[in-house]
Image (cartoon, grey):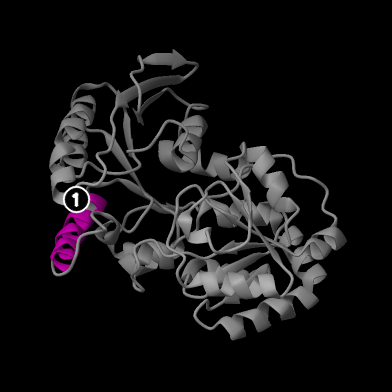
Amino acid sequence: MHSKHDKRVYRSVQALAKSGKVLYQYISETEESVYEDGNITYIPIKWSEPKKMHPIIKLAKRRVLDDKILELIAKTDYDILYLHHFLPTKPIAPFRIAKERGKKVVYDVHEYHPQNFLADLPKPAAVIKENIVKRLFFAQLKLSDVLVFVSPDVVDDLNISTLGKPYMVIPNYAENVACPVLDVQQKWNNKTIVYVGKLARRLDEEKTLMKRLLAEGFTLEIIGMEDSCFADIPHIYTGFLPYEEMIKKISGATYSLVSFTTVGRKNYKNDLYSLPHKFYDSLAAGTPVIVKESFVSMSRIVKQLGVGVVVDPTDVEGSIRRIISAYEQYKQIVQNVLVHKQEFLWDEKKEEEFVEFVMF
């Protein structure tokens, strides 16, 4: 399901390749041949996700792709099956086949799948789907030997301790790259708020807040995506940037806004428990974050470490007061970010712990 250089997936491939051979299957939009580079054998499968199609029809078409991946799992020689997702048309089969073959199964859970899978289904079908997928999801968890999660709140929500499975929480840490020396006074003077993202999200609640921030003298800079929702908001648009350039751009901003809605549902756990790359990238760049209050995992970190502002976009005036108050204490907040910077970075120690957990 993931492209070759998906940040989270490729990081695990590179880390594990330092201690063993990795057969890496990924999705490619073009025809590519299997090839080896060091300890990694790259196994691309060409696949284009159908667009503007009913989710049930789209799911049916996925069977062709799922069969190809399942054949690899059933016939390839390996010791550990590391899954970053599951096969929608055959959700249990990879786990069962690997276990029958005596293989160790590692399940890296990126999202809360009962809600994430077929997220656009309308009610009442969505409710039925969620109950069915939740049962399948727990069957997958039980067939796994070890589990990896993005957020501790997903672990708690699922009551993972009752399964008796070893698990590890690995948020979407930032890459440990060179970062410019911060000029805190300049960051304060800039009054720039960056919004970083690769995929367009729903920002209905955030638009009024953004406009009010502009009225307070802030400027808005969009990095990585341009969407029609920004058409009536004055902003600077910076297209997709290589990672180090993106970090440099973020490091010069006053704040990074991390607020969005994926599917328009208040109880969508993939939003509530999210710890996305843009959150860790911003803090690693030395820039305080403005985080939506309903984002449980992120807002707790911001409050505990004092590394930003927690706001409710539906309460525009209250949010503005919080942001202005934080702006008056800006130097202290940036200092908090710098003190805790290592907690936001993927480093050698975290990588060694991850490899040890997966392989032994």
Query: Residue at coordinates 71% horizontally, 67% vertically from top-left?
Result: 218
- Which residue, given by chain and number where applicable, does mark 1 sit on? 55
Circle count: 1
Looking at the image, residue 6 sits to the left or right of residue 71; the answer is right
Q: What stretch is highlighted in magenta?
A: 125-141
Quarter of the figure with the N terminus: top left
Q: Is residue 101 visible?
A: no
Percent x, y of residue 206 = 52, 70
In this rendering, the answer to whether 200 lies above or below 4 is below
In this rendering, the answer to whether 117 lies above or below 175 is below
Percent x, y of residue 355 = 49, 38
Q: How crowded is mark 1: few (under 14 residues within 10 Å), some or many (20 or more)?
A: some
Between 99 and 272, which is closer to the camera in this rendering?
272
Query: Residue at coordinates 25% horizontally, 54% vertically from top-left?
Result: 117
Percent x, y of residue 35 = 40, 14
- What secondary structure is the magenta-colored segment mainly? helix
In this rendering, the answer to whether 42 lies above or below 83 is above
Asked where in the image residue 178 lies, by quadrant, the reply is: top right
Asked where in the image residue 69 lies, by quadrant, the reply is: top left
User: Does the magenta run of residues contain 94?
Assistant: no
Between 31 and 143, which is closer to the camera in this rendering?
31
Quarter of the figure with the C terminus: top left
Looking at the image, residue 110 sits to the left or right of residue 170; the answer is left
In this rendering, the answer to whether 142 lies above or below 348 is below
Asked where in the image residue 186 lies, by quadrant, the reply is: bottom right
Q: Is residue 43 visible?
A: yes
Q: Which amino acid does label 1 sit on?
A: Pro
Mark 1, secondary structure of its residue: helix
Between 86 and 50, which is closer to the camera in this rendering?
50
Q: Which residue lies most toward the front here?
A: 232
Percent x, y of residue 288 = 69, 63
